[in-house]
Image: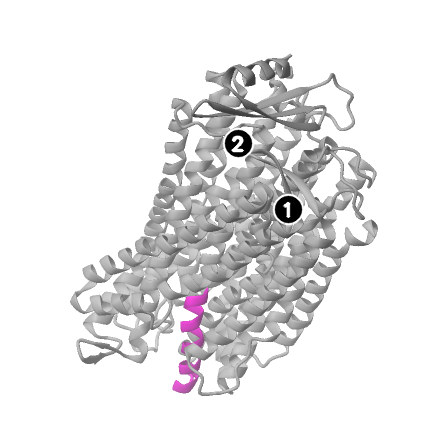
Amino acid sequence: MESIMIYVPIIMAIIGLAFMAAKRSWVLKQDAGDGKMKEISDYIYEGALAFLKAEYRLLAVFVLIASCVLAGITFIPGVKTDILIVVAFIFGAFFSALAGNMGMKIATKTNVRTTQAARTSLPQALKVSFGGGTVMGLGVAGLAVLGLTSFFIFFYNYFMGGVWTDGEAMTVVLETLAGFSLGAESIALFARVGGGIYTKAADVGADLVGKVEAGIPEDDPRNPATIADNVGDNVGDVAGMGADLFGSYVATVLAAMVLGNYVIKDMGGKIVDAFGGIGPILLPMAIAGFGILFSIIGTMLVKIKSNDAKEKQVQGALNVGNWVSIVLTAISCYFLTQYLLPEVMKMHFFGEGLKDISSMRVFAATIVGLIVGGVISSVTEYYTGLGTKPVLAIVQKSATGAGTNVIAGLATGMISTFPTVLLFAGAIWASYALAGFYGVALAASAMMATTAMQLAIDAFGPISDNAGGIAEMSELPKEVRTRTDILDSVGNTTAATGKGFAIASAALTSLALFAAYVTFTGIDGINIFKAPVLAMLFIGGMIPVVFSALAMNSVGRAAMDMVYEVRRQFKEIPGIMEGTGKPEYGKCVEISTKAALREMMLPGILTIGFPIAIVLVGKLVYPDNNMLVAEMLGGYMAGVTVSGVLWAVFQNNAGGAWDNAKKSFEAGVMINGEMTFKGSDAHKAAVTGDTVGDPFKTKDECAKMCDELGCTDQEKEMCLSHYDANGKFIADAKTMACCAAPGAKAESIKEVRIETTNNDGKVKSIVTTKTDGKVNTQVFEGTEAEVAAKLDEVRK
């Protein structure tokens, strides 16, 4: 049974990839239209491919340098990290880049086929565009589960012979596996930041000169930046998002596996089950695997029948597929938790000692995560969707100018943090109350289980946007553009809800990794009354803000270059405004490419470097107090997580609301009793608001990436901090376990944790004693003197 179950996630991943290959083949067989449509599509494809090649060349250098550093660390005397972590790191980076590249290629091939399908009917256009998104979603999820599970099986057999021995040996397995997650997150950071800078620089430049100054429509072929704008949709919102969610997916599952290992340790270091004693570790991988299967079912249900359908019907079709995949995943979580976990487990709760937790409570924690994943999309849709109250309020404010439009958009983004953060807070509280930190991590894993479906919906947006651009540039009949506009409008909302899902995943993933870090280092809490910890809390809160500023400045500088280039072409190329002169599209693509590659480095270095700097400075100032250094790092991550989530939600929802406020004018909108359309002063104000919102939609991901990458690095950095420069082991007894060599027979290590409360003279102490991995909990009650006497006996 054990030998079968450990391979189930791989089987599910292969099924997902096989379905992806079949869907890809179907999409590519669809009609790609006439010569002009193909020419424009080829421009977009070649521009996107050129950017990715240049970006991946740069990232290959980064991976090489990082691999050398990781390899060097493994040779430091006393460090137990295996050299195989380098192999895992390289493959994690490769799989992440492959996921983004694969998604970008299918997206740039699907766009023109969607345009051609729109000449036939709206249902066919939806089928083709969502088919391309499905390829993207299943490719990312399939590669993530395949890579992570395969490496786990290999390391499990390599370090433990495929048989459970003890928790410390499994710690080595998972620590080495963390290299895969670190590689994926490293690529995700640069791909998301670089792609985001590219797309929004092109978007801002195209809008400022094209729509505001020249007064020509969006995606007009006379605009030299329009190809760069469409390329940006693919490198940012497809390749970037693919790498982003690949990293989140892997990190979430890995964090749950790490905490599953600690559940086994809390139960005395060994459990009896049908899976070799590793059921709590297998569970997150199994949930991810079945999530792929049910995402496939969900994608099959996304369809409409009427050619006269509007945005509401298209959005409804996407929602049906999404919720069906969530409900089916919830049902599978019930059976998996009952099948893989003991009926009752012991888990450590801070301040409460060990508690008996039933498998049903673990299942309830997974339901919390699935609900968050579904509801967060609905909340984001409300604040950013076409025709919703917040978006219409921004439209109304546009009547009095760009200033009031911007004010309304900012307010919408800010107020949207209220329900979102309450949702996150409730999820964190509920999942921890149900099953401790393991419950929190499984809630995140369950939410990420439907990543394939979520990403399919998200990738549908830029594909539809590109399809509309091709229709406009090819000067196709009005009914074609009307159909692509319907898909594009829904795509704007799905792009915002997709980013909302990414933010939610980052929030819960960060917390899961943070929980793994706290458990790993053994700190009892983060005491903000300690000045160094409080200082790091504030520094952590500052990082997402600075990161966002760097990203916004990068977009601004690149957009200025784009504006100057577009103005130059309008001035110097004869007949460009009359449609007889051909713009130099390649110049604008080149500007965005160079700017994105140049500007993405500093934010990335800031994110990776700060946690390392904190450990080094902490070790320098407090060389004999490792636990204080651990608390400092924990304070930093707490600040990054809270600040990063708030900024990400605010920016994403404000940007999405501005975008759809502008879109509202295309079909006409009622303002003060009069119908107002494109070209009006109110529409120009909305365009300005959308231009402000473009860089907002870049930097929301930048802020959340601080959470993920910082948390991913923590275990490695703190493990290294247990040694001095000469390789001497200097950690206290509490933190020694994480660095013990697998199977080593070191001297007996005894840990004692005492938690005491005094209620009107009645004293209660919970004493948790751990000796060589065996845990024992005692509770003493009585007067202060009686309890003190009992505690003295324990201390002896």
Return the disc, 1 or 2, that comes first in the chain's sequence. 1
Q: Which residue is mark 1?
A: 92
Q: Nearer the viewer, residue 15 or 534?
A: 534
Q: Which quadrant would the C terminus be assigned to in this image?
A: top right
Q: Is residue 232 above or below residue 217?
A: above
Please rate how many residues cluster around mark 1, counting C-alpha atoms within 10 Å: few if below 14, some from 14 to 19, many from 20. many
Q: Name the amino acid, label 1.
A: Gly
Measured from the top left, where is residue 668 in percent x and y? Answer: 28, 79
Give the extent of the magenta segment. Answer: 475-494
Q: Do the numbered discs 1 and 2 sit on residues whose CB atoms are within 8 Å? A: no
Read off the residue under disc 2: 351
Q: Tell us which disc is closer to us: 1 or 2.
A: 2
Can residue 572 be seen from the camera position used here?
no
Q: Is residue 749 left or right of residue 447?
A: right
Q: Is residue 152 magenta?
A: no
Q: Residue at x 41, y 65 (%)?
A: 381
Q: Main secondary structure of the magenta part?
A: helix
The amino acid pointed to by label 2 is: Gly
Task: Give SS at disc 1.
Answer: helix
Q: Which of 303 and 90 lies nearest the eye of the viewer? A: 303
x 46%, y 29%: residue? 526
Tell me where residue 347 appears, x and y as whole percent.
63, 38
Q: Is residue 171 visible?
A: yes
Residue 35 numbered mark, or none: none
